[in-house]
Image: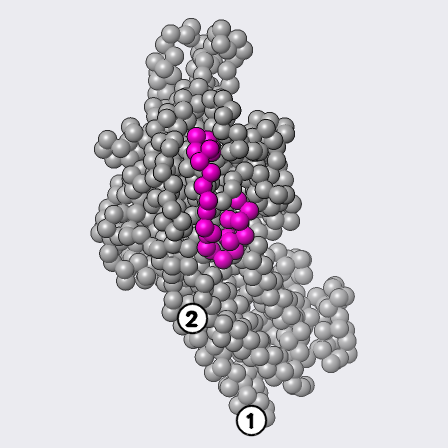
Amino acid sequence: MERARENGSTGELGSPTQRPEAAATALELLVHGVGGASPEEMLDDPRTVRVTGDDTAAVYRRIADADAEQRPDADRGQPVPEAYVWCNLTSGNGSRALWLLLLPFMVVNLAHWMRPTTRGRKRTVRLYGLLVRLAGLTLTVLLVAAACEVALDLAAWQCAGTRACAEEHSWLAFLSPDASHDGWWSQPGRRLALACLIPTALTGLLWYLSHRTWSAYESQQPMSRKAEPDEETGRTGLGRPGFWYGRRLVARLRAAHTAAGLLTIAAAVGTSVARYDRASGGPALLEVLGRFLEVSLVAGFAVVLWVVCRRGRSENRLDKELDRTLVRLLPTGSVILLILTLLYAGWSRPGWHSEGRLSGDMTFGGIALFEGMLVIALGVVAHILFRARPDTRTAMRGLAGPAVAMLACALGGVMSGGVAQRVADWLDGTRSSIPGPPVLLTWQASTIPAVLVALAFVLGWLAWRTWQLRNREIGAVELDYEEAAKDPARTRRIANTRAMASLTDRAPLMVAVISSVTWLLGAGALAGALATEDPPSEAARGTYAFVQGAAETAQALGSWLIGLGFILFVTWGRRAYKDPAARRTIGILWDVGTFWPRAAHPFAPPCYAERAVPDLTWRMATWTRATGGRLVISGHSQGSVLAAAAAWQLKPSVRKRVALLTYGSPLERLYGRWFPAHFGPAALSSLHREVACWRNLYRPTDPIGGGVQLPGDCGPQVDREPLKDPLAYGRTAQHPLPAPILGHSDYQADPAFAEERGELLARLTPDVPVPRAGDDGAPQGRSGRSSE
């Protein structure tokens, strides 16, 4: 095992030597799900030892099983359990809640993986990925533009240029012409140059986090192997050698997005200064320099667009190459251009005074318009892909990706507008001494109450449907436990749990309604801002009293709701990382979002699967090769998704010697519907054919897990009949105390778990012939406890 780990750094496997005495050993590799678990809990033993791994993710055994392969004569009757613990990849100290500020980037990255399944149509698939990458680029520009709005426009331009505001905030006095008596920093161009350090630091922080998390989480090379045919057999792209290692694309996108952020800052400073030079009739040299900088900015943005559009993911091979010249020169060139812009802005212009707002309305309006057009184009492409190979199980008939991309843009707009609105209120209070944020941001904030009203209607409809379903489930519960004495309260409790669990299947409706309403309200806000050039309260003056009152209420309420939502967002996020109960409640959404590689946005939170999947693949390949024994990979909840992804990454000769046991699994219920190109019926059917055997357990009370529902005869071969939950309706000899309703947890407590695991092991051949070195590239080195 140690030799395998040493060779693992190069992506190759050493020449193995089999130990025949270990061939009868059976191994159960346990993979936990959302919320994580300790090795002691997973192995049901307080004495455990780390077999391999580090503090971030590792494999553990009970101390008594540390040398199990060396004691094949031991009469166990059960497989040797191993626990793969990966919870530290997605949880940890409370500071990781700050990753929630990158939520719009994570959501747009999800849209990339939600494309409908198709066969052929490579150009259409590439166009879909390109449109999502462009949407991700607009979010980066939007974030940096919002930081520029706060630092440059509200603080340096408006507040520092207004005597009353500057006197209220003494830390801005040295920038104020009145308070500093026309000090050196009081000229508008120099104020802008100094204030741009804040968005520049933000851009640098995003670059640093992306680079650091890549090294810490995603730089694990999978095993080197040849690509398998997938287009003809319907296999998923998750089985391609380079799926979990996209270094080249992430590096290119990181360089492009960093450059886009720096160019946005340079444009915010340079265009304002150049506009003044052209209007004031100042020195011709300054006007020429201003035009040169504007042309350079346009050229820089064109290069960024070319980089984003030029190349997508290379999944058929390990993407080890790196475009070093581009990755270095693009951000460096942007930094140089920004420095030149700051020097140009710092030139003395004694007659220049700041008035009104900077050109924020045009910037934010252009971004909003472009994002709306991208969502429409993405919807058209997704519809074309869906019609080519329709599947009724696909969420929103293939439009889930565009809808989620719309939500990402809306989140970015709400967060940007919320920060700008809160800062403006903090700087100015209620005195209206400064113009405030751009009109469009105020219009967007005013749409929040309408979105909440639409959401309330959807929630009300869902509550009514859930109540109806609960009434129907009462009869089903009575049939399931017809031999027991009836307890109406117990029956209602079980029926209510089943009905609440079904809400997961109605998530597409909520996403469809919210994304549609958001798009329509966003379009209305953009039209209102362009038509009136006034905030809603001002635009409604002179109209009906009801309209004016509604506009004023929406504007005030929207501003406070954004501020309150931002505080709750960070607070709940921190609680979810520190409180296991809260994490199990909302953790599934976060774990789904960070399961996928960063293909559309390099600043999204890191992908834990790019560490976890290679870990599991290496462990299964090296153990089966070394011992020739039987292996069951047992995955709960999100762990079942990792188990399936790892099985796809195995070489065919190894995959045929591995059994798969999943329970509480969202493989079809969540991933199959929302990510049909990678977890659709064809992909899951291929997994069933390619592993030795597969069984899936689920409960009707589980809000996350469900059946795999393969078509034809394959369905019953994989899915067991839904497990009873609770195990006993009333008090029995086996359950003298009331049995709990387990829902998504503790599947091992059901006797069906041990039964299915035993049948899987029985179907695996214990004396599988071990391939010679080089047959599949896996080592036959020692297994068991490492020298830690």
Q: How many other residues sit within 10 Å of disc 2, few (<14), some (14-19) or many (≥20)? A: some
Name the residue located 23 percent from the left edge and 33 percent from the top edge. Answer: 712
Query: SS class of the residue under badge 1?
Result: helix
Taking the view exactly as shown, the residue that stands out farthest to the bottom is: 284
Q: How many other residues sit within 10 Å of disc 1, few (<14), some (14-19) or many (≥20)? A: few
Q: Is residue 611 above or below residue 784?
A: below
In the image, taking residue 198 as reference, residue 469 lies left or right, namely left
In the image, taking residue 584 as reference, residue 383 lies left or right, namely left
Separation of residues labelled 2 and 1 (CA atoms) = 35 Å
Q: Which residues are magenta?
A: 1-27
Which residue corresponds to mark 1? 284
Give the percent coordinates (x, y) of residue 769.
Answer: 36, 38
- Which of the pair 315/741 is nearer the observer? 315
In the image, taking residue 640 as reference, residue 393 lies left or right, namely left
Query: Which three-letter amino acid code belongs to the residue tagged 2?
Result: Val
Q: Which mark is residue 90?
A: none
**Does label 2 or label 1 sit earlier along the sequence?**
1
Which residue corresponds to mark 2? 307
| Image quadrant containing the C terminus | top right
Q: Is residue 723 above or below residue 599?
A: above
Give the percent coordinates (x, y) of residue 611.
Answer: 51, 49
Query: Which three-letter amino acid code belongs to the residue tagged 1?
Result: Ala
Give the percent coordinates (x, y) of residue 250.
Answer: 47, 62
Name the residue located 62 percent from the left edge and 60 percent from the top edge. Answer: 424
Residue 304 visible, this angle: yes
Q: Is residue 50 above or below residue 550?
A: above
Q: Is residue 715 magenta?
A: no
Name the residue located 46 percent from the left edge and 47 percent from the top edge. Answer: 16
